[in-house]
Amino acid sequence: MKKILIIDDDQEIGAMLQMMLELKGYHVEVKDRAHQIMSLLEHDSKDLILLDMLIADVKGTNLCKELKANVGTKYIPVIMFSALPEIEEECKKAGADGFISKPFELKELLSLIGTLIG
Amino acid sequence: MVSKSSQNLPKYSFLLSKGKVSDVILNKDWSKHELGDPKRWPQSLKTTLSILLNSKFPMFLFWGAHAIYFFNEAFQENLNFSKNSLALLGERGEKALGQSWIAIEALIRQVKLGKGATLNEDEFFQVLQNGKKRDVYLTFSYSPVIDESKTISGVFVTATETTNRIEINQQLLKSKEELEFTIKAANIGTFDFNPQTQVYTVNDTINEWFGFGERNNEGIKLEKAIEAIHPKDRERVKNTIKESLSFTSDGNYAIEYTIINQLNKKKVLIRAKAKVIFNEKGEPIHFSGTMQDITVAKRLEASLIENEERFRNLADKSPMWVWMADNNLDITYANQELLSFIGLNHFSDFTGKTWETIVHPNDIHIVYEIFSNAIKNKEALSIEIRIKNASNLHYSWFLIKGVPRFEMNQLVGFIGTGLNIQEQKNQLRNIEKRSKMFRQLSELMPEKLTKINSKGQVIHYNKSWLDYTGVTLEESLAGGMVKFIHPEDVTEVLTAWCDCLERGVNFEKEYRILNRNNIYKWHLGRIIPIKNKNNEVLEWIGTTTEIHKIKEEEERKSNFIKLVSHEIKTPLTSIKGYIQILLYMVEGKKLIDLEKLPVESSLQRIDAQIIRLTRIIEEMLDLSRLEEAKLELNLQHTNLNELIDHTIEDLTYIFPAANIEVNHNYRMHLKIDRGRMQQVIINLVNNAIKYSPHSNKVVLSINAEKNQQVSFSCKDFGIGISPKNLENIFNRFYRVEGDKERNFSGFGIGLFICNEIIKEHGGLIKVESEVGEGSTFKVFLKEDAVKEGI
């Protein structure tokens, strides 16, 4: 079972995505902040990370850069999402493998996830 | 007695006089001399010597066959030819007189030959007079001295000095030569007519004019002279000569006539002047005078008259003043325009008037200064003076200009113009007044102004500029304004400005400028070129307006819009997600495991998100209402304790994890807008939860306060608010910013709206906070205002 980590400070979004992805058969974990994410990933590696731009403690792009700079985490695909479509470029620059703007089509998200981890 | 008297008597009877010459004769040893002892000298010699020695006129004598030389005291003193002349007395003439002897001997011989007395006039000699050499002219008279034997044995010579007469004659001659030369040089003809012989004597000049041909001593016959006169003038000239020669006339002759040169047939215009001299019988004996060739002068005179007439015609029609003045700058002509301005009809009325009578008293000294300089330096003059208008007695400004006139290199006066410049002066004064006003205005106005020259250099900063930067004008001008522009903006500003400077077009840019407190503030800089008729830039005027507040407001607005869209999109995303899941279910698609689908909880979540969305939209509407000042309260008697309880119940559903505690320390009824008050409670609790990432506890308390006030407070244990942010927390679009706060989603207008609602209720919100400890928002409401009706 592929494991997905969702990082979003909006509990509603997190819950909705969790419900949907679990229905789809993924193992899902939700966090609302970047705090301790790196240590979490160290002993519990994930297949994909869904990362919101706005999270409780740091900017989503900063976390993305950190993930992509770390040998242990750099190969985990990261999909970033935001209510502001204009930041797509910024996210790609930070190393994100995919970008989706809110509100998104589930089909689109699922197909993007499928493309990245099968 | 005898011896005594014989001692007193002279040794020689003829030596009665005393002096050096007498002493020589007396003391000379005559014994070996060819004349022998003087006592035995012939009586004629002695008599002659006696006359000679007693005379005060210079005289000398040659006696005997060998012409023995004697002279007297006067000769010795005044006309002596050599230094030791006394030693020569009694010597032979030949020996005593040296070279002069030859000429003298010839005369003596003539006298001795019995040719009588002889004059030798104006002989030049160099003589010793009182020991000094002098050039003299002497006239000698040689007379024979006849002795007892009736033979001429001596020649008696008297000398008269004629030096003065000779010198006068020489001067006369010189003067005459000079006069002739002058006459010739001045091209003046002279003539002398002899009425008896009817013959003219004329000088070379006249001879040339008339073309009489080669000169001879016979002069020109009257008929020949008349022939040369132009036929039209001939009779007139003849008659005039006749009149002048008649004794009844005063003898003055003055006439102008034309002659025809007899050789080249050229016409010459002659002006003749002469005077007739009559003898005692009344007959004319002399008729002499001068002639002038006035051909050129006459022609010039005619053209001058014509020119002057033409000039006057023009001048009188000129709308400008035209004047002429003599070399003292006294007015000799004024045109009609000038005359009528000073109230005169005709120039003759101007007689005796000077500039003083028409010029403003304060300007007179300038007139004198400029005029005397113009006369002294013979140069053009230009002066602005006030002149009295005769019609209204007011002074008007005139620009008077004049140029010097010369005749034969002599300054003869000035010719000039006068232009009424009162209107120009008025305009100039207005412009000066306005530009002064503008300068004052530009200094006083709050806008920052700069003046920039055509090369792009700032040449002036107004007071506002200097006040803003806190740098003096001198330093600003020396240092330029670039150093005040924010480093991030400077390249863009300079690039744009260089482009505008080159193309001469308006510059407009927003950039940050450093103030005196070292803080950059946003400004709108505009620079506009001022151009001349040829579209060339003369200078630039720059205005710099502080737009910092506008800029900040704009930035906040743009952030707000981003925030709103984010806030709306988040519940929308959630709703959309649940609906899509439910849709799959309804459509029976087997994409997901339907058994596991929690329909009820999904619908509840959708509902909660729609409530959230509705609240956001409400807040936005509130904001626009606040902007239009349309926040209307629907006041109702309300139990605040109950209202708070209900609201917290609703919130617990939205924030299931939150631990909200409510302390009812006081119970109250108030007249409030329930919906609005609920909005305030939701906002405060919402913020408390949002800014407390590590704590879920929120405490609400309802209390009685002093001065008949009540309060409810909302306390959290979150990140707190820094003192700097506390100042702005109730401002619209203000969202506390910092590394920690940045990522909290939420609406920037919540607290602003709360504050507005409470103010509308006549209350007030206070906040106390400490970073890292949490914040307490406390709402105060007046109890008495709301107690009625309970």
Image (cartoon, coloured by chain):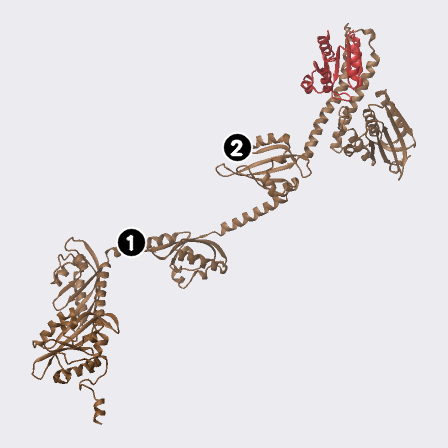
Identify the element where label 1 is drawn. helix
Q: Is residue A97 left or right of residue B318?
A: right
Q: Is residue B508 left or right of residue B55?
A: right
| Residue B94 % position (x, y) | 13, 72
The answer to whether any part of residue A104 appears in the image is no
Q: Which mark is residue B502?
A: 2
Label 1 marks a residue whose chain is B
| Residue B531 % position (x, y) | 52, 38
Q: Residue furthest bottom?
A: B1
Q: Is residue B305 above or below residue B142?
A: above
**In the image, what residue type sits under mark 1?**
Ser
Q: Which mark is residue A4?
A: none
Q: Residue furthest top?
A: B590
Pointer 1 residue? B303
Q: Is residue B148 above or below residue B305?
A: below
- Which numbered disc, 2 or 1, marks the residue closer to the eye? 2
Image quarter of residue B355? bottom left
Q: Is residue B456 above or below residue B298?
A: above
Camera-side residue of B244 and A47: A47
Label 2 marks a residue whose chain is B
Q: Is residue B464 left or right of residue A109?
A: left
The chain in red: A
Image quarter of residue B525? top right
Specify the colour of chain B.
brown
Check the picture and name the quadrant holding the C terminus of chain B: top right
The total of numbered circles placed on residues is: 2
For marks 2 and 1 on the same chain, the one whose residue lies earlier in the sequence = 1
Q: Is residue A68 left or right of residue B485?
A: right
| Residue B642 % position (x, y) | 90, 28
Identify the element where label 2 is drawn. helix
